[in-house]
Structure formats: C-alpha cells, structure tokens
C-alpha cells in the first residue's frame, strides 16, 4: 500500500514536510515517495496529506494507478474546456 | 512653471472625496514622519521612490497552501511577467548570495522581498532562514514579504524578529460567497477545504493577521486583484475595512488572465478590467484609502527598478563566479543612497514651491486630459518613443497633475513583429495609449509620429530631460491656450 508521485509533479515542496512517515524525498526530475515507508497516512490522518495539498491534478496516484486528484477536481476547470482551450492555442 | 502633484484635492471624477489619492510624494506628506521615513526609499510603497530605487525578489518559497483562480502552479515561462512565475528556484544559501551580488552591482537596490512563487509563509523554514541571514549579513537592505494571509497569524511573532517592517497581504474579498468564486480550495488543519467554507477561514486569517501586524507596528499594504463581475463592486468595501484596521496603502491590480496561462480564469474566458475601469475603482477607493497606482505586478524573481527586470544578469551560474566584498559595497551604497535622498528632497521642495505658486494662479476651467510619458526613472522624460517598454499615464487638470497608472508598450510575447490579430508592435503600442491625448518622450520617429496623430494622440518631443509634472502641465497649458480644451470641443468629441 503506497502512493506514487509521477512526472507532472512541479517540485513545489508542499507535500514533503507534511508526510508523517518521511516517505517523500526530493529527487530529479521530481519528488518521489518511498513505497516501503508510505502508509497512505493510515493511523496518522484521515486523508493522505500529500494528496491533500498537491496543487497538480493527476500528479499523485494510488496503488491502482488512479489519480487521487483527477482532472478538474482542483482547478475547477472542466476537462473538456481545458482541452478546447489547449486545442485552440495549438491551432495558432 | 508650476505644478502641484495633486493628491489632496478630489479627483475630477469618481469618488475621490476625502484626502489623498495616489501614492505620490505629496500623499506621503500626509503620513506620519515615522511611516514616511520607512517608505521613502521603498519603490513598492512610494510612488516617488520608484523612480529612483530598485527592488528584487528571491524565489525561495515554492509551496502554496491555497489555490487562486488567477494562478497556475505549472507555469515557468521566461517571457512571462506576472506574479507566481519564476525561472530558478533558490535555496536560502543561493538567495543570500544573489541578494548580496545584486546589492553590490545595483547600489540603488534597497529592498529584498520574498513573494513566492508560492506563499512565503507556507515555506517558513526557507523564508525565515533567508531573512535571518540577510538581516545579519546585509543590514542595509529592507526586508519585506507578501502573503495570501492563511498562515499569517502564526508567523507574526517570527516576522517581527527579523527586521521586517513591510508586509503585503493579498485580500480579494471579505465575503465568503465572493471568496468561493476566487479560491477553489485551501489546505487547513491537514485537510483540503473547498468552496465557501475554505474561503471563510482564509478571510478570517487574513483579517486577524492584518490586525496582529498593525498591533506590532509593522506596515501593511493590501493588494487586491480586480476581477470584473466577481469582486469589482466589492473592493471599495474591502478598502474601507482594511483601512479601518490600519493598513496604510491599498493596491488594486487588474486581473491578468490569458488562456495560454492555463489558469481557471484564463481558460474560462474571464476578462480583466480595462484601464478606465481600473482607474474608476481606484478613484472610488481613494476616498477612503491611500491608493497605490504604480505596481507593475512583477515576477517572483524580478530584479531592478519597477518596470525593468535584470534577472538575467544574476542567474545562479553568474553569481557563482562573483566575488562580493559586502563591507565595501555597503559603504558605496550608503553614499549613493544619501545622494539620491538629497536629490529627492530638493525636488520635493521645488514641487511644493511650485504647487504654492500654482494655487495662486487664476484657476483654469478646462477639462482634464490624460497624457502618456516615456521615462526610465529619475522623474524626467528621458526615453525615445520607440524604445519605451512602458508609459506612465498622468492626468492634467485645473487642479494640477496626478499620476494615474502605467501601461505596457508591448503587451504580448516579444520577437515576432506581428501577432495573431495582424497588429504590428507599433499599432499595439498606440492602441495601449487609448484615452491619452498626448505622448511625451525624448524623441519620436516619423512613422509613429504620423500614426499617433491619426490616432488622435499628439506626439511631443519638446520636453526631453524635463521633470515629468512640469512638462505635462506645460503641454496642458498649451492645449488650453490653443482652444483644444474648450467645453464646446468636448461636446463635439462626445458627439463624434
């Protein structure tokens, strides 16, 4: 049972000091979670701390590879609206 | 020649009814001696000082504890200039070294701020480590910090230990209903809290932090982002409240929102205010509060005078090779600062004398006029039209001359001469001067001269190296004498 940080991490440091298991460490090109140490905060907090402060949708996954913060959940931007805006920008 | 920079008298329109509008030197005359002494060499707090003194930000604070709809934590673009954007994150070690390198090479740099790219107080160790070491090693640099306010009440004690006498809090609302439209979530007591509930906690923390800072005698400036249709009608109330609690300056800034920034407001098509809307709101708030109008909404790693960014000269690889003798630099800085302050004081005296003369002249009855000025500092007109990266906007009226705002000359990405809409850089620059009737610069070329005239903006290169306010008033009087400001013509303009 462990969470995972993936490449969309922007290295903002917010999660690192919150981890009760000291499982999160600075690495290149982005922060990582030591799966041997990660407890998903069970026993310490009711919700995983890293995923509760992370500002980037999709950057933290659970053991099934599911994003704890799926697209649209943090910014409030509907995913289809984001896709539309990005497509329009690329067309220019 | 005359010239009061008026900020005592009511604005010609809008609600500037009581006392000072505009953070100009005259406004500073209304502040207590103590506050004036604290801000007179701070470019972000004094409109007068920003012509002479420089600031820098060190980007040591990447983490944030809230999300704002005008911010995107993913972005880092060298060509973008807006808060929250940086190119290199620094450790406190690197930040101290960079600050001392800049102080030695740009002696007019008086202020070091930590402004992000996240929230400085959400990174207390990195932020306070930097402050602690700078207050010991570089005691001649003023330290300041800006924050969203969520962690502020817990940080006031620590802030007061480090010689930090200026704090900026961004307060966009005092109503959680409105807050929920600006802040989608906050991180609070080990949880992400969304919507109105999160906004309510943030607002309470901001107000409490403001009160605690004021009680400690720390100067507080309040920044607000003006978001049309969201908080524009609400900010006058915010202004009243923060003033009543002891904030000494309010800075209402326009929302920056472009789809390519990937922010909620950018992608959802929320527009920012235009220049006239921003000015109207600033004038409305100014009845209650000292307003700041010279903010450039700079990056969290900006270096130099406001409106310029010399960050490229002080990248990590460059400062690694610099050997700094800070003691020697401090001596040199002291001499230069004294010379600048003497120059500012003598100019202030001259202005006061001119204001008195002007008050005794027959009062004109002409309408107010906006003029654009090209300057690179020192309070004089000293930039060629084609070289201006920005213009300062002044209003001349029978009451005198007052500073209104700045406008960027080239508002889009650099490089290409044309943008998507087919406007050239020159056309865009002229477009950005909308509402102005004259532009004063050290020189103007043939091509822009004709285009400016066609756009109804009178180019003027006759006042090179003259003090801005004198030149603006001289041009205003010429316009009055030639009949350009008669009421009849105004009526004609309105019809046309």
Image (cartoon, rainbow, N blue to C red):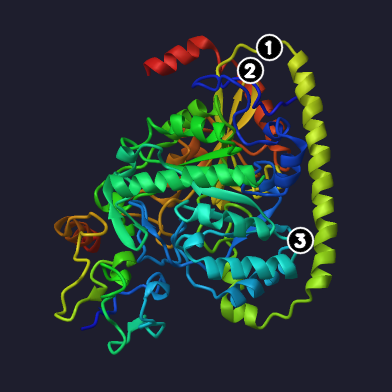
Location of residue A60 in the rendering, given as x and y in whole percent from the top left corner: 26, 74
State the SS at label 2. Answer: loop
Location of residue B254 in the rendering, given as x and y in whole percent from the top left corner: 43, 42
Mark positioned earlier in the residue sequence (3 or 1)? 3
Q: What is the spatial separation of the Cα atoms under label 1 and label 2, in whole angstroms? A: 6 Å
Mark 3 or 1: in front is 3
The reply to whether residue B427 is visible in this rendering is: no
Name the one closer to the observer, A43 or A13. A43
Mark positioned earlier in the residue sequence (2 or 3)? 3
Q: Chain of mark 2?
A: B
Location of residue B427 in the rendering, given as x and y in whole percent from the top left corner: 42, 45
Identify the residue under disc 2.
B398
Identify the residue under disc 3.
B140
Name the side, left or right, on which B4 lies relative to B201. Answer: right
Which residue is pictured at 50% across the width and 44% down the height?
B208
Q: What is the spatial separation of the Cα atoms under label 3 and label 1, in whole angstroms? A: 46 Å
User: Label 2 near label 1: C-beta < 8 Å?
Assistant: yes
User: Label 3 near label 2: C-beta < 8 Å?
Assistant: no
Name the one closer to the observer, B162 or B88. B162
Q: Residues within 10 Å of mark 2 (few under 14, many from 20)?
A: some
Q: Quadrant of residue B348?
A: top right
Location of residue B423 in the rendering, given as x and y in whole percent from the top left corner: 36, 48
Vertical side of A1 occupied by B147: above or below: above
Q: Residues within 10 Å of mark 1 (few under 14, many from 20)?
A: few
Mark positioned earlier in the residue sequence (1 or 2)? 1
Q: Chain of mark 3?
A: B
The reply to whether residue B176 is visible in this rendering is: yes
Which residue is pictured at 59% across the width and 47% down the height?
B213
Identify the residue under disc 1.
B363
State the SS at label 1. Answer: loop
């Amino acid at each position: 049972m462990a969470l995972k940080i993936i490449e969309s991490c922007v290295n903002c440091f917010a999660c690192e000091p919150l981890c009760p298991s000291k499982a999160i460490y600075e690495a290149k090109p982005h922060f990582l979670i030591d799966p041997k140490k990660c407890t998903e905060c069970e026993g310490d907090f009711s919700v995983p701390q890293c995923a509760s402060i992370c500002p980037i949708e999709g950057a933290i996954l659970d053991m099934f590879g599911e994003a704890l913060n799926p697209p649209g959940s943090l910014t409030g931007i509907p995913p289809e609206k984001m896709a539309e805006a990005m497509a329009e920008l690329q067309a220019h | 020649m005359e010239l009061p920079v008026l900020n005592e008298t009511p604005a010609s329109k809008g609600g500037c009814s009581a006392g000072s509008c505009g953070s100009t030197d005259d406004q500073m005359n209304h502040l207590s001696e103590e506050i004036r002494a604290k801000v007179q060499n701070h470019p972000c707090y004094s409109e007068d000082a920003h012509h002479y003194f420089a600031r820098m930000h060190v980007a040591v604070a990447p983490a944030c504890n809230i999300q704002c709809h005008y911010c995107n934590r993913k972005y880092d673009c060298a060509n973008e200039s807006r808060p929250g954007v940086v190119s290199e994150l620094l450790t406190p070690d690197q930040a101290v070294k960079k600050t001392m390198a800049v102080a030695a090479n740009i002696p007019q740099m008086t202020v070091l701020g930590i402004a992000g790219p996240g929230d400085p107080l959400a990174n207390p160790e990195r932020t306070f480590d930097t402050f602690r070491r700078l207050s010991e090693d570089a005691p001649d640099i003023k330290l300041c910090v800006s924050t969203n306010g969520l962690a502020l009440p817990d940080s006031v004690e620590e802030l007061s230990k480090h010689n930090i006498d200026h704090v900026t809090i961004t307060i966009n609302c005092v109503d959680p209903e409105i807050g929920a439209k600006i802040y989608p979530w906050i991180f609070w007591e080990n949880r992400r809290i969304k919507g109105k509930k999160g906004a309510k906690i943030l607002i309470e923390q901001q107000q409490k932090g403001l009160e605690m800072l004021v009680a400690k005698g720390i100067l507080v400036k309040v920044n607000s982002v003006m978001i049309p249709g969201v908080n524009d009608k609400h900010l006058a109330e915010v202004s009243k409240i923060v003033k009543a609690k002891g904030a000494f300056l309010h800075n209402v800034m326009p929302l920056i929102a472009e789809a390519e920034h990937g922010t909620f407001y950018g992608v959802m098509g929320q527009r920012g205010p235009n220049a006239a809307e921003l000015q109207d709101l600033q004038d409305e708030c100014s009845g209650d509060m000292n307003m700041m109008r010279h903010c450039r909404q700079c990056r969290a790693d900006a270096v130099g005078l406001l409106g310029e960014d010399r960050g490229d000269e002080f990248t990590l690889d460059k400062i690694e090779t610099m050997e700094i003798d800070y003691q020697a630099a401090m001596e040199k800085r002291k001499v230069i600062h004294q010379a600048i302050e003497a120059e500012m004081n003598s100019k202030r005296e001259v202005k006061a004398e001119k204001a008195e003369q002007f008050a005794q002249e027959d009062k004109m009855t002409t309408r107010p006029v906006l003029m654009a000025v090209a300057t690179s500092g020192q309070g004089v007109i000293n930039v060629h039209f084609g070289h201006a990266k920005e213009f300062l906007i002044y209003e001349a009226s029978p009451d005198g001359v007052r500073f209104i705002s700045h406008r960027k000359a080239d508002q889009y990405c650099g490089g290409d001469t044309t943008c998507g809409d087919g406007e050239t850089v020159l056309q865009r620059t002229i477009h950005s001067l909308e509402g102005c009737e004259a532009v004063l610069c050290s020189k103007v070329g043939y091509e822009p001269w004709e285009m400016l005239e066609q756009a109804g903006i009178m180019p003027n290169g006759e006042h090179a190296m003259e003090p801005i306010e004198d030149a603006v008033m001289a041009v205003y009087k010429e316009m009055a004498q030639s009949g350009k400001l008669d009421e009849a013509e105004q009526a004609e303009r309105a019809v046309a």
